Amino acid sequence: MSNHLRIPVQGVRRAAALGAALALAGITGAAAHAFYPTPAKLFGPLFVRVQMAGVFPDGKTFVDAVPKASPQVVLQRFRKNNPRTREALLRFVERNFTLPPPDRTRVPKTATLRAHIAALWPLLTRPAAVPPLYSSLLYVPKPYVIPGGRFREFYYWDSYFTMLGLIPDGRMASARDMIDDFSYLIRTYGHIPNGTRTYYLSRSQPPVYYLMVGLLDPHDPARAWADHLATLRREYAYWMRGAAGLRPGQARRNVVAMPDGALLNRYWSEADTPRDESYRNDVLLARASGRPPARVYRDLRAAAESGWDFSSRWLGDERHLATIRTTDIVPIDLNSLLYGMERAISRGCAARHDLPCARRFAARARRRRNALDRYLWAARRGYFSDYDWRSRRRTGELSAATLYPLFVGLADAQRANAVAAVTRARLLQLGGIVTTTIVTGQQWDAPNGWAPLQWIAVQGLRRYGHPRLAFRIARRWVATVRRVYRNTGKLVEKYNVERELPGGGGEYPLQDGFGWTNGVTQALLTLYPRLDHPSRGGAP
């Protein structure tokens, strides 16, 4: 089969035909990736020159551009013109590519935060993605909501938190469309990619698809899981691929066999090359690291799969990104979510009266919970901590990921109470929950707080009988979002929760829009109506 660039159909027919052909042929994962060449593969020497010269301040700009002719023609022109300077390269790209349009998600300030968020949804909504020829965009059949800013496509775990706000705003149809799109991605590729671009196909993101599906029937999520059982099980198989034959102390793909043989998971990536969207950054970092470049690239990609790109959680030396070792880490959040997925599949099977399946997945969930308690619970510290499977020890770092076992109902009451105490003493800041307690300049470290982590904390603490602490987190977070909105007219990607300011750090400038901030903030305002009236304050 030739790749999608030669499929003799156009628009939706072309994209859908390839997806169907790959699915029918059983070609998924890394094999399917080969049929969707990334910009780095399509434009080779031109791609390297543009990215390494820093023609655009953001490396994502070029990989989202659409060529005006075939790659062969563009490369012929490139070799003929041989633009030598950065300025000449820019002129060449502008003549031969259509660059991404500027962000247009801003709306006038409104009287209330709720009204502003409601006004943003239409601006963040995109029609079904029909990729132009040779574009990096992936086809999906239904409309979707993007985060905003540089994030022009839609993303896996972002979308769950976005949905939390779409539904109370009366946009359940939008949430259903996005779930249909994710189901399509699983059927086509065998997993949900990081985002809907070819250069994201080699990795996924935190597995929250089962949580999205549960939103379809909040009073009886098992019925929704039963209706989506095939896609749930297929995604689970993706995360567990490589488990067969693993011996204690070994890892393959996303699976790690712990010292006693128990199976837990890690973040990983099919590819060990520089990320297309951050090519220059990755190449320069690998050169400076003194480590095998392929190892550095895979660890960078694995951190991108985690959603925490980047954080001291993944670093051997918290001061230096070059020491990244994501694939060495068995993380709290990923394994908590996979526990939740196993429980969801078990309940979906039970709703279908498939009792052997229900028992099998319930047993897997129990084994995962026991392994999490054994390896990731730091009893003396009173919180869950990531585990380094190579050195066979916990990292000891405290992060907001310690609240995930509460969110999915994995922790027992004693551990949950200890986590609540540590959260109150060390993670709760003036503006919400801080991501870690370490300042590194990386965006998933102090002093930043992120919308999804506030929701995880609030829901986890409520689940285990800590409503006052949950409300305090929600109140402080909403107050921070409201303060920044009043000062800037924006809802942004992340916040400095120590000073109630816009956040900073990371590989790119602060983005506004912003999907998951809108979603979580709207969900918290729905959960706690008194937060609509900040002057009233108080605990529930």
Image: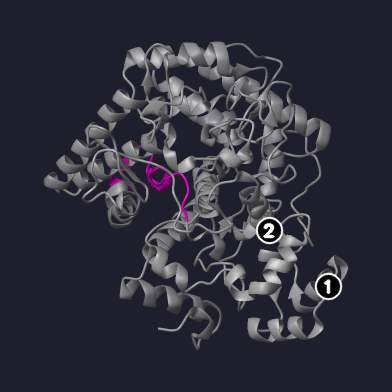
Q: Quadrant of residue 86?
A: bottom right
Q: Amino acid at mark 1?
A: Arg
Q: Secondary structure at mark 2?
A: helix
Residue extending furthest bottom?
8
Query: Which numbered marker is on residue 351?
Result: none
Query: Which numbered marker is on residue 84?
Result: 1
Residue picked out by circle 2: 60
Q: How is the image coloured?
A: one colour
In this orientation, which residue lies closer to the viewer: 463 or 276?
A: 276
Q: Is residue 297 left or right of residue 258?
A: right
The answer to whether residue 97 is seen in the rendering is: yes
C-alpha gap between disc 2 and disc 1: 22 Å
- Read off the magenta span: 203-224
> Is 186 included in the stretch rendered in magenta?
no
Q: Secondary structure at mark 1?
A: loop
| Residue sitting at x 22%, y 36% | 261
In this orientation, which residue lies closer to the viewer: 281 or 168?
A: 281
Pinpoint residue 183: horizontal percent, then vertical percent: 40, 59
Circle nearer the viewer, 2 or 1:
1
Pinpoint residue 30: horizontal percent, then vertical percent: 41, 64
**Among numbered discs 2 and 1, the one appearing first in the sequence:** 2
Pinpoint residue 457: horizontal percent, then vertical percent: 50, 25
| Residue sitting at x 49%, y 47% | 302
